[in-house]
Amino acid sequence: MISVDEAIRRILENLPPPVTEKVDYRSAHGRVLAESLSATGDVPPFNKSAVDGYALRAADAAAVPVELRCTGESRAGAGRGSPLEPGEAVAIMTGAPVPDGADAVQMIEKTRRSADGARAAILKEVRPGENIILAGSEASAGEVVLESGRYVGPAEVAILAMFGHRQVTVFRKPRVALVATGDELVETDQAPGPGQIRNSNAPSVAAQLRQLGLEAEYLGITRDDKAQLRGSILEGLRRDVLIVTGGVSVGAYDFVEEILREAGLEVIFSGVAIRPGKPTVFARQGDRLVFGLPGNPISTFVSFELFVRPALERICGFASAGLFRVRGRLLLGVKHKAERTSFIPARLSWLPDGWAINPLRWKGSSDIIGFSQSNALLVLPQDRQAIAEGEQVEVLLLPDFWQRATR
């Protein structure tokens, strides 16, 4: 067996080269840019008002209160209008162009308009440049506004739209196939017979993939039959990544690794010093990747997060990959068998003195019900048999941590 860190290192060293594609900017949300993009013009394209008020010459309001002649208005979407002369003011709306000759805007709360609208009293002094956003102050034409490798969120979509970048180059999402194995499995809409259970691993992995913005191509349940499993694996290898749940341990009907070797794949590793998830397998055939995950629900879940997620995130263009790590104070002492690194369910919360970690009671790697109460994975190093209450420990935040965090 190899360590968790060594397994992750080998996975990241055996990823295929990135592939890019052009997409409509509206479809770029959730993707990673594979090109840097520049401003196609100045932003803002003109001096604009940051507030509703009056555009004026600051020198005219050096001694307040003072009344200025109102000569018109400037509103968003209109031109600058006539240049401002000394002693004049123009009513102006937020985002509207500042007329030539004006060098300040006084907010409307610090003014008073005459009953006939012909004059505006400026009640407080205003400095030159106050409440004006200068042309090009946010971005100038030709300036890089989105660099290659940037995740495209809602703000980035707005930037793409602002500068007219309708087609953008992003890293292509991998096609992922998913196979579940086991004679004991039936699909969710079926009633289990004697010795059977409903398949929960495939739906769980599909949901984990969906958190990455990927849709699994589910190839169904494959029975513990070598010929049938070989056919499913070969079909899965027509995609970029194949995930197989079950069939990777040392039982008489665990054929996955054997079939992978017979099909000419290079098995990069088989077995990791981890609890749960020890039998995890990773193999490669050219640019095709295969992950064999253990069949117990929590083993499947944890192995996906530790090994599959980093690989898929890198393929999708993310510079950093894997679950976010923090350290916090252990609220309850824990013990474990120290020959493997353990990842156990925990609740992480923020207290006045920092992060606090509460390990959860669970009944082993099949207890998905108990595991569902967690929002983090507590890391128990393989060289420690016991960690005392109050010690600082490391946890991995689950991808939906903030949705699961106590509010």
Image (spheres, rainbow, N blue to C red):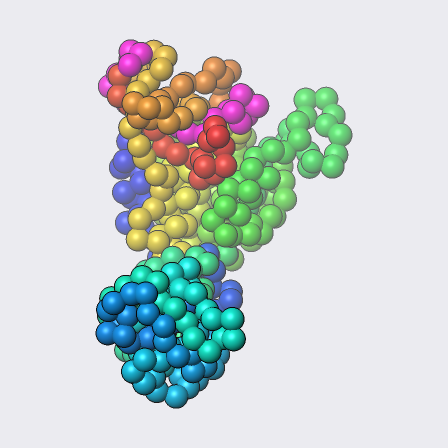
Q: Position of residue 14 (x, y in %)?
A: 31, 50
In the image, is 28 to the left or to the right of 311? right
Q: Position of residue 367 (x, y in %)?
A: 54, 21
In the image, is 400 to the left or to the right of 203? left
Q: Quadrant of the N terminus?
A: top left
**Depth check: 333 or 386 in front?**
333
Report which quarter residue 112 is drawn in.
bottom left
Which residue is found at the position 39% from the left and 79% from the top?
69
Residue 373 lies within the magenta run: yes
In the image, is 352 to the left or to the right of 383? right
Which residue is found at the position 48% from the left and 28% from the top?
406
**Depth check: 95 or 310 in front?**
95
Which residue is found at the position 33% from the left and 70% from the top?
66
In the image, residue 237 above or below residue 268: below
Q: Position of residue 339 (x, y in %)?
A: 30, 19
Which span of residues is magenta-colored?
367-390
**Depth check: 401 or 203 in front?**
401
Query: Can residue 324 be seen in the rendering of this structure?
Result: yes
Which residue is found at the position 50% from the left and 46% from the top?
211
**Depth check: 1 or 68 in front?**
68
